[in-house]
Image (spheres, rainbow, N blue to C red):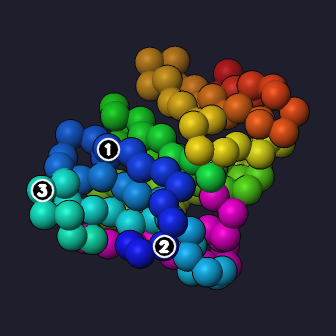
């Protein structure tokens, strides 16, 4: 992962971490790293349906095992069992590094729109 990292989050109850890093476009990707060895286990690079070109923040729902990625103006949901993107939800927010959080109890995702300074809550 020689490119610049823009976010990292622990992936559930395992010894895995998800590192989001920016390579030269279109090679932006999410790498799942073994927490003990530091080796990349799998990388998600997106596709035509789920584009990973402009992501800025990551968060994990520990209860459901879902990884959320703020990707430009989309919120991507990644299944951490099979490491695949399962959905993309359009959101009216530009979220950077620490502007994404998951509340598993209330089943809500919070995004901070850093351009307008507003909080966007999904799942209400």
Residue 81 left/right relative to 113: left
Helix, strand, or loop for circle 2?
loop
Q: Residue at x 77, y 45 (%)?
A: 94
Q: Is residue 60 magenta?
A: no
Spot the residue most to the left: 36
Residue count near mark 2 (Cα–Cα under 10 Å), binned few <14, some 14–19, many ≥20 = few
Q: What's the mark number on residue 36?
A: 3
Q: Nearer the viewer, residue 95 or 81?
A: 95
Residue 93 left/right relative to 37: right
For the magenta stretch, what is the residue range? 41-55
Task: Name the residue tied to disc 2.
Answer: 3
Q: What's the mark number on residue 24?
A: none
The part of the image, by quadrant, that contains residue 72 is bottom right
Mark 2 and mark 3: Cα distance apart in space: 21 Å
Q: Residue at x 57, y 26 (%)?
A: 108
Q: Is label 1 or label 3 in front?
A: 3
Provide the major secondary structure of the magenta segment: loop
Q: Residue at x 67, y 21 (%)?
A: 124
Q: Nearer the viewer, residue 122 or 28?
A: 28
Q: Earlier in the sequence, mark 1 or mark 3?
A: 1
Task: Name the residue tied to disc 1.
Answer: 10
Asked if 87 appears above or below 114 in the picture, the reply is below
Tell me residue 26's x, y (percent): 64, 81
Q: Is label 1 or label 2 in front?
A: 2
Q: Earlier in the sequence, mark 1 or mark 2?
A: 2
Mark 1 and mark 3: Cα distance apart in space: 12 Å
Q: Is label 2 or label 3 in front?
A: 2
Asked if 40 appears above or below 26 in the picture, the reply is above
Residue count near mark 1 (Cα–Cα under 10 Å), binned few <14, some 14–19, many ≥20 = some
Q: Is residue 8 visible?
A: yes
């Amino acid at each position: 992962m020689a490119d610049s990292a823009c976010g990292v989050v622990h992936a559930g109850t395992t010894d895995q971490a998800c590192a989001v890093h920016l390579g030269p476009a279109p090679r932006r990707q999410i790498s799942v790293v073994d927490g003990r060895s530091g080796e990349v286990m799998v990388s998600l690079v997106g596709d035509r349906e789920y584009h990973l070109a402009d992501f800025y923040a990551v968060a994990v729902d520990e209860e459901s095992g879902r990884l959320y990625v703020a990707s430009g103006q989309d919120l991507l949901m990644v299944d951490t069992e099979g490491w695949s993107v399962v959905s993309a939800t359009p959101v009216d927010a530009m979220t950077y590094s620490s502007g994404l959080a998951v509340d598993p109890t209330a089943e809500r995702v919070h995004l901070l729109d850093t351009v307008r300074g507003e909080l966007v809550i999904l799942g209400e």
